[in-house]
Image (cartoon, rainbow, N blue to C red):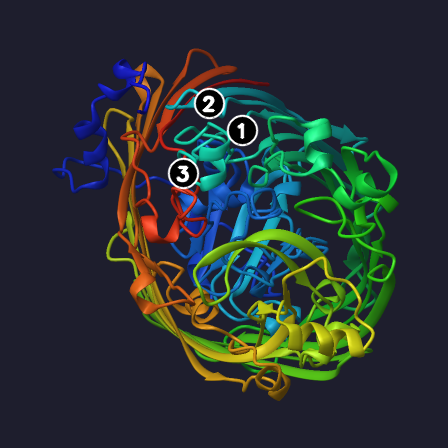
Amino acid sequence: MRRTSSFLALRAFPVLGLASLALPFPAPAFAADGADKLSTVVVTGTRVSGRQAADSVQPIDVISGEQLSNQGTSDLAGALNKLLASVSVPRPHNTVGGEAVRPLVMRGLAPDQALVLVNGKRRNAGAFLNTGGALGRGTNPIDLAAIPVSAIERVEVLRDGASARYGSDAIAGVINIILKDQSEGGGINATLGRYDDGDGTRRELQGFAGFALGESGSLTLSAEGQHNDATNRAGADITPGAQADGVYGQVTNKVGAPALESGKLAFNASYALNDAVELYSFGTWGRRDAQSHYGRQRATSAAVAAYFPDGYLPQYDPVIKDQALVFGSRGQLAGEWAYDASVDWGRNTYDPYIKSVNTRLFNETGSSPTNFHNGTYESSQWVGNLNLSRAFDVGLVEPLSVSVGLEYQAQDLEISAGDFASWYGAGAVSMPGISPLSAGDWSRHSLATYLDLEGKVTDKLTLSLAARHENYSDFGNSVSGSLSARYDFTPRIALRGSLSNGFRAPTLTQQHYSSIQSQSQDLGNGPVLVQSGTFAVDSNIARLLGAEELKAETSQSQTIGLVLRPTDNLTLTADAYRITIDDRINLSSAFPVTSAVARQYLLDNGIVSDSYQSVRYMTNAADTRTIGLDLTGEYRWRLDNGDNLKGTLTYAYNRTKVTDLAESPAILGQLGIPISLVERREVGQLTDTNPRHKLIIAGDYSISALNLDLHAALNRYGSFWVYSNTSPNLDQKFASKWTLDLSASYSWSDNWRLTVGADNLFDTRPDRTRAENNATGTFQYTSYSPLSADGAFYYASLNFAW
């Protein structure tokens, strides 16, 4: 039974009054609020200096650092999820790392189909590959959690394909993180919170400070520290093993958000040598130590009984480290050319540790370690970029902006073997370490040239053209182009649209990643716990089972949008889009290899290991088509008494359909493996497992006389399906859910501010998994839900600024 909340007073908050902030008010004499984010000068989706968000030819959302900091969540992806309907961030649990490197889904596409920039520079890829039961299986996302929110001035989110301007990955859009650039001032913020169930206590400390560098420069430093306790939403254990051990009906597992400790640093500096040359540099450093668990292991073997006579939970402790550093110079060359030259380096490391035992080692030697380092995945990237821009007077209403550039990338992936004991024999129980056979070092490079043109053809028509050619050392050439246009019928009505093609190169991690993990998989007879091997496409075992070299994904995108500004206070946008993607990169189905025929075939071809029951690899097996609609609205009031009121609405709809699937390799049929290359559950993850609808209605009211700011956000997460490989009768639809977030902030001087709030005030949870799909009783909630199963979260933050 869930514990009764001790926060009854908070639940008595004037909900109706705050919720009404998002509804129309009577119309007294209001003045326009000058702090309109549409007047923000943006740098994403254009190389024209001075372009404002309100005049962009493509849809761009601008999220301020203050908006990010005012959310009840501490990580960047989670904050964007609270603010943008076009973004979805599921809350997976116990998914072999997905709970520590959370996937961000944009426009219903894969997590690695959205490009991430920092200060306009390409962010390094992560080393983690999502292989667990979470959205985006087989994707290699950028680690957004490595960037401290306290360092962010704003985030510009371009909701359109942009490969022609930025290169690989920008199929769904671009997230450009702009860092704070201050020569004075700063702030410190401390946050404490916990969940309504009494667990998951969160402790955070954030701070930043700006410093002047002489009379011509600035330096901004930022730091964050975080310590989160784990949550546990596991159900009662109803397995025969639990009955035999006398713990039937008890909670014997841990399923929920991981325990987490993290530290993050960032800096952003610039110094003008003279009027024509400015030097700049910025960088980030981060480390996260997470802790989650696998399913309970009984003391049925001598090894387990020797160290854990009552059984144990194997503990999975990934350590994620990320460093990034950029040096550059910008300014004016001879004549009227502006330049920006930079060198960008980044590295992400994923180190899995596990607390378990090696049964074979114990049986052969009489002892086994109980702590293992399972190896290291390390991805690094160098980028050199030179961009030249100039405006030419060619007879248009405004000068034609021309940008040309070169970009060189060098990428490296190093996979290091784990401790001998971690992989010897069948390896550590639940997750064997990386064997020397899977270790290696791989690299590639690419060279890109690009051209951007943008100008106002008439007073009403703006055109933008971009073209890019890239040559990769491992899979060849790619040519991307885009044409965008905006027609302003009046200063208050505009139509915009774009046509583009794009691509996403397979990452080195996707090409060469290998691991063996204990996972619940549906191999055609219902979910069972198996040791599942994920193998590189160029490995012997993957090739024997039909794997082929990965190709780049290619895309075509069309967008059309309407921008309305009926009054100075009201802005409305609607953008419809269609995105087709060929050769999508995804994990194959898990192929069972336990039959005598399959084992003999593998043995005859040199595969002697029997430490796994299923095999899978990366494929280009699916073509998809996504259609969608993004709606945004914002209304601002300033009352005569100085109070400010803002209402916002953001809604997203997207639907993906698989238009073609590759045929299964013939060898599978010959071995009697009755599983297709991409099964219906995998197809469902591409189509119906991500909710099609998301709605956010928010209101903010500032009472100037009381120095009080109130915030309310009503969120609706759409329904979704999780499919079964065993039978359509086991498919489950998870219903749509509404949540309410409330917060209140009080400032008692120019320096001090206290915020108290509740996320998911009414403790809404996802639907429970059907009993037929939860045979152990442990996994009450699905890992695919965008709504956390942890429930209501209450927090308080104290901020001191100077």
**Marks 1 and 3, the one that precedes in the sequence:** 1
Q: Amino acid at mark 3?
A: Ile
Q: Amino acid at mark 1?
A: Ala
Question: Residue placed at 68% from the left, 71% from the top?
Answer: 506
Question: Residue placed at 57% from the left, 70% from the top?
Answer: 162
Please, which residue is most extreme toward the top here? 748
> What x and y, as percent, mark residue 335?
79, 69
In front of the other: 709 or 130: 130
Residue 637 higher or lower than 676, as above or below: above
Q: Name the residue carrying label 3.
A: 238
**Marks 3 and 2, the one that precedes in the sequence:** 2
Q: Name the residue carrying label 1.
A: 230
Residue count near mark 2 (Cα–Cα under 10 Å), binned few <14, some 14–19, many ≥20: some
Between the C-alphas of marks 1 and 2, the distance is 7 Å
Q: Nearer the viewer, mark 3 or mark 2?
A: 3
Q: Left or right: where does residue 577 sit relative to residue 439?
A: left
**Marks 1 and 2, the one that precedes in the sequence:** 2
